[in-house]
Structures are given as C-alpha cells and as structure tokens.
Image (tube, helix red, strand yellow):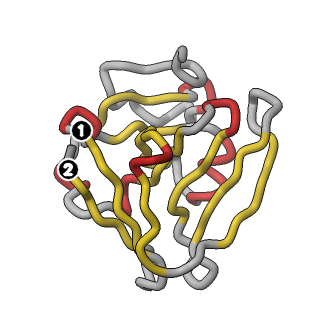
Amino acid sequence: MTSVPGKCHCGQIEWTVKLADQEKSHILCHCDACKIVNGGEFTLNQVIPEENFKLEKGEPSKYTYKGDSGNPVHCFFCPTCSTHIYHHQTALGPKYIIRTAALAGSKEWPVGAEIYCKDNLKWFPKIAETTFPAAPPS
C-alpha cells in the first residue's frame, strides 16, 4: 500500500488515500450524474475502503442524491472551488468512490475499466478493455 496525496483545485481541501499498486488506475464512470457534475463525458474514479481515506486539511461540503440502487449517494466536495473529492454510495457499504484526477501522479495511471457504458455519448469511443453497462457486479 502506498499513501497518495490529493488536493482540490484551490488547495483548501487536502486528503491522503492508501492504494495498492493495482488500484493505481482510473475507473471511468459514464453515468448521467457524473456527466452533469463533471461537465464532461466521464469522471475518473477508484473504489477504496473507507479506512483508506484520510482528510488532512479543510472541511468538505456534502449533498445527497438517490443512486440507481435507490439508496443515498453522499457527494463530498470543496465548498470554495467545487472539486469533488469522493462519493459514498451507501449501497456499497463502507467504501468510497474517490476522484482519482485530483491525486498526485494520477496522470501516469492507466484506465482499468469503464462503467455505466449504457449512458455513453454515442460518439464516444471505448477506452478500456473491461466495460460494464452499469455498475460492475459486487
């Protein structure tokens, strides 16, 4: 496990995540919620146990919406610059969906998988070898 620092665009919020080498990859999410939040075709993510996330500086804001499972999804973001830090999908239990683009060194990481491909913009090409029409099986 390696500790990887992250920070929001304005630097008000900082955090550290512990990742195994195989977790140093991006899961591209094409769901409509991610497109709206991100203003683009997908978000860059990784799923980690809650205990592998540590808030180092600042206090994120939170909003909640209902996910495809019907359960709440809590979204944590910087109140100043609106960078999304992580989401907690309660259907996944004690796991966080971290936004990997805000982590140090993530520009070098490969794409590991794509999820919610059913919501892709029709002109967008497949990037990963592993794809799922919605969420991957648990």
Q: Residues within 10 Å of mark 1 (few under 14, many from 20)?
A: few
Which element carries disc 2, helix, strand or loop? strand
Q: Residue at x 58, y 24 (%)?
A: 135
Query: Which residue is at the front of the view, 126 or 33?
Result: 33
Q: Which quarter of the image is occupied by the C terminus? A: top right
Which element carries disc 1, helix, strand or loop? loop
Q: Position of residue 78 (x, y in %)?
A: 57, 75
> Which amino acid type corresponds to the residue marked 1 in the rendered image?
Ala
Q: Give me the C-alpha separation between circle 2 and circle 1.
A: 6 Å
Q: Which quarter of the image is occupied by the N terminus? A: top left
Q: Position of residue 136 (x, y in %)?
A: 52, 20
Q: Residues within 10 Å of mark 2 (few under 14, many from 20)?
A: few
Q: Are marks 2 and 1 in contact (CB under 8 Å)?
A: yes
Disc 2: which residue: 2
Residue 131, image quadrant: top left
Q: Is residue 16 left or right of residue 45?
A: left
Position of residue 6 relative to residue 51, above or below, is below
> Which amino acid type corresponds to the residue marked 2 in the rendered image?
Thr
Q: Position of residue 67 (x, y in %)?
A: 75, 37
Disc 1: which residue: 20
Query: Which residue is at the front of the view, 23 or 111?
Result: 23
Q: Is residue 92 left or right of residue 69?
A: left
Q: Position of residue 115 (x, y in %)?
A: 50, 28
Q: Residue at x 30, y 50 (%)?
A: 18
